[in-house]
Image: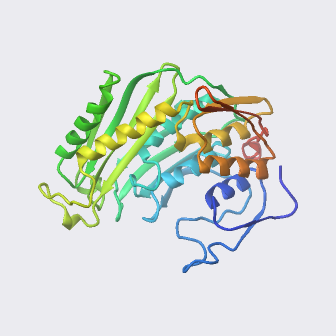
């Protein structure tokens, strides 16, 4: 699927996704005018340069993700690249585990990895372990990720029935603050969830010392599991600008209280459930990429209202993989059904090893 000439792209929009698709399709790209009109033009520290070639993979890798973006920013591309690598990937990522910009590492562990089984990826080789947590602004968290490499191709998916919600699970965390904050978050969230469903369990994960990173914060990630095995997620995080500004009794009026955070994340999850579809809005883009990478069979999926990111993902899929989706809105359920014939991307790196 390689191309002789470099594809010219302009601007920094979806830089990460473009580079991943270029790598998976062995397409050379030239990106011009990155933030040319900004006060600080050029690449940010968290934006990596990739030269298309063989994805090597490997064990005992390590990467410092910095503090500009969360570790979640790096997990999605690592998972996609790892599936098509010459060797399985095992890597330690250091930085911010929970923030307001990117999906939390808890969401990846509880939801994203389980999505892959719909495309034939065995869960036995997938692992995401949270060694320590790190909240903004200083981070200090660490996770361990294992991704297996597939033998040849993914499997086309027929995934259109989201079923009914049967239980809600989640995890509430706190770093360098009173562990009672987690109980306050959970109590508020349960107050919303129990109006609709009795089976709700949210675990606590209090971290102190080195396991709590270098900044104070708290948050929660919740997942709705349906009768057909779909997982819908929502998460939220609050962090303090400086550890010295927080103690067990202080309340910063500018920060969201634990009670309000619990209500907020519960409302966010209920909104995801109400929108319908087999994945939540955060995972639409990844879902479409997996469908497009699959063998040249028909994949069919159903989602809620398309997000702007998902729409841009469909454009990038068209440009790099030459895969076009048939999009059919359902006015009765306000969901959207999408069908495509996959590009049949194979793991050629494994065959050259």
227 vs 50, left or right, is left
The percent coordinates of residue 17 (x first, y second) are: 64, 54
Q: Can residue 238 be seen in this view?
A: yes
Q: Residue at x 59, y 32 (%)?
A: 334
Above or below, 197 relative to 52: above
The number of callouts visible is 0
Q: Quadrant of residue 34?
A: bottom right
Is the image coloured rainbow, by chain, by secondary structure, or in one colour?
Answer: rainbow
The percent coordinates of residue 94 (x first, y second) are: 42, 58
The percent coordinates of residue 64 (x first, y second) are: 46, 62
Above or below, 90 relative to 29: above
88 vs 230, left or right, is right
Q: Which residue is drawn at 34% across and 56% down?
A: 134
Above or below, 25 relative to 247: above
Residue furthest to the right: 4
Q: Which residue is drawn at 61% across and 75% down?
A: 42
Residue furthest to the front: 331
Q: Can residue 221 be seen in this view?
A: no
């Amino acid at each position: 699927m390689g191309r002789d000439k470099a594809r010219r792209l302009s601007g920094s929009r979806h830089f990460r996704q473009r580079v991943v698709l270029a790598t998976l399709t062995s397409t050379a790209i030239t990106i011009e005018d990155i933030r040319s009109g900004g006060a600080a033009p050029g690449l940010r520290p968290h934006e990596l340069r990739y030269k298309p070639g063989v994805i090597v993979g490997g064990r005992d890798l390590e990467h410092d993700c910095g503090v500009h973006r969360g570790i979640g920013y790096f997990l999605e591309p690592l998972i996609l690249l790892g599936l098509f690598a010459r060797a399985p990937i095992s890597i330690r990522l250091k930085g911010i585990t929970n923030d307001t910009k990117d999906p939390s590492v808890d969401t990846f562990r509880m939801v994203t990895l389980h999505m892959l089984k719909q495309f034939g990826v065995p869960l036995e080789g997938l692992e995401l372990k949270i060694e320590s947590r790190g909240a903004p602004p200083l981070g200090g968290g660490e996770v361990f990720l294992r991704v297996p490499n597939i033998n040849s191709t993914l499997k086309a998916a027929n995934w259109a029935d989201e079923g009914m919600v049967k239980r809600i699970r989640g995890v509430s965390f706190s770093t360098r603050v009173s562990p009672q904050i987690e109980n306050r978050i959970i109590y508020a969230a349960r107050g919303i969830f129990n109006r609709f469903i009795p089976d709700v369990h949210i675990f606590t994960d209090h971290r102190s010392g080195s396991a709590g990173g270098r900044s104070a914060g708290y948050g929660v990630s919740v997942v709705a599991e349906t009768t057909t095995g779909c997982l819908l997620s929502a998460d939220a995080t609050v962090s303090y600008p400086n550890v010295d500004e927080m103690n067990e009794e202080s309340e910063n009026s500018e920060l969201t209280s634990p009670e309000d955070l619990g209500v907020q994340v519960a409302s966010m999850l209920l909104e995801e459930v109400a929108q319908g579809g087999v994945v939540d809005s955060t995972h639409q883009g990844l879902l479409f990429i997996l469908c497009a990478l699959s063998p040249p069979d028909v994949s069919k999926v159903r989602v809620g209202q398309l997000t702007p990111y998902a729409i841009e993902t469909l454009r990038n899929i068209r440009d790099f993989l030459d895969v076009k989706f048939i999009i059919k809105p359902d006015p009765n359920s306000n969901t959207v059904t999408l069908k495509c014939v996959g590009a049949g991307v194979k793991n050629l790196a494994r065959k050259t090893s």
